[in-house]
Amino acid sequence: MSINRFPGSVRQRTALGSALAATLLISGCGADVEPDATASEKVTVKRCGEPVEYTTPKRAVAYEGGSADKLFSLGLTEHVHGYVMPPANPPVSESPWASEYAKVKMLSEDLLNKELVVDAKSDFVVAGWNSGFSDQRGITPEILDKLGIQSFMHTESCFNYPKFPEKAAPFEALYTDLERLGRIFKAEDKADEVVGGLKKRVEAVTAKTPKRGPVPVFLYDSGTDQPFTAGSQVPPNDIIRTAGGRNIFDGLDQRWTQVNWEAVTKAEPEVVIILDYGDQPAKKKIDFLRKSPHTRELPAVKKNNFFILDYNEGISGPRNIDGLEKFAKYLRTLER
């Protein structure tokens, strides 16, 4: 449903004028004047670095598991119209919120686009910059604003947003999103509860982190000629660091980025995290690393130290903490 940012016809304005005159007469007799109910329903929340005025959404569309998980974790299923899941996303039946996915519509198994959102009569879209929202594909917050459709971007992805960039550590960005969505949907108490629970789980992992020095870790996303990996601005970096490891590319102030095999070899990672896509199975990636002359002699490969991270544990969403707990447990089992 499109949001009309300038409601009211001439007839409505005339009626409002008459009502205001009557109110002024009453207030002159000492009566209390009630505030405008419509104004009280709006809330200003940041979308990346831009303050945006929101009205509580009723037909939200979520792109990818991270977006939908955030909404479902806050108990907002009744506000969600549907979701879009690209091929990389594993089946929603594997989600902790599988029962909530079943209550809303699966709108597409392709990339997010403007036509899909308009056809769904959506009044709110949640996605990341350069993943869901994209200048090249013609669906951006600015374009949706002009259509009267509200939008929200993952804070983690705001690092790359050219108009109103915002930088936050990945876990902090997750907490920020949940708190901001809580405000938009008038679910602040639930957001506080969810964020508090996630923070306690992170603290529990930190308390068990081995005292030894951090284990060098390479995250392998994809790529054969050149590997695609995680810089410091995406959730796996916080997962690795908090669990007691060190992302060998944590010095790159980037999100997902391409590097060269020489840099991987030089870093001598003792663990390789494989990001497991729905359409790029982990087994094929591991087979490649075992055969490639660039990687077959790496300490991690020779020791068979592979850890598989689910796609939805690696992109911004509450399942990041699931991934953290699993990886921390894995690191504690390793002998060095």
Image: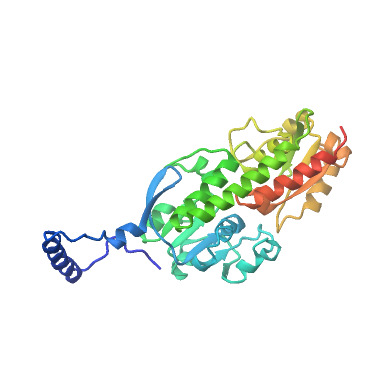
> In screen coordinates, is 61 left or right of 326?
left
Q: Residue at x 78, y 29 (%)?
A: 211
Toward which corner of the image does residue 205 lie, by quadrant?
Answer: top right
Toward which corner of the image does residue 86 lie, by quadrant?
Answer: bottom right
> How was the colour assigned to the protein in this rendering?
rainbow
Examine the rendering and report whether any part of residue 215 can be seen.
yes
> In screen coordinates, is 17 left or right of 271?
left
Q: Nearer the viewer, residue 7 or 303?
A: 7
Q: Going by the picture, which residue comes out furthest to the front?
A: 30
Q: Is residue 319 above or below residue 83?
A: above
Q: Residue 128: x, y in percent?
A: 53, 51
Q: Nearer the viewer, residue 289 or 4?
A: 4
Quarter of the image containing the C terminus? top right
Q: Residue 148: x, y in percent?
A: 36, 61
> In screen coordinates, is 311 left or right of 111?
right
Q: Residue 247: x, y in percent?
A: 70, 35
Q: Is residue 36 above or below residue 273?
A: below
> In screen coordinates, is 263 left or right of 193?
right
Q: Residue 197: x, y in percent?
A: 62, 49
Examine the rendering and report whether any part of residue 227 can be seen.
no
Total numbered badges shown on the rendered structure: 0
Quarter of the image containing the N terminus? bottom left
Q: Residue at x 53, y 63 (%)?
A: 76
Q: Residue at x 16, y 67 (%)?
A: 19
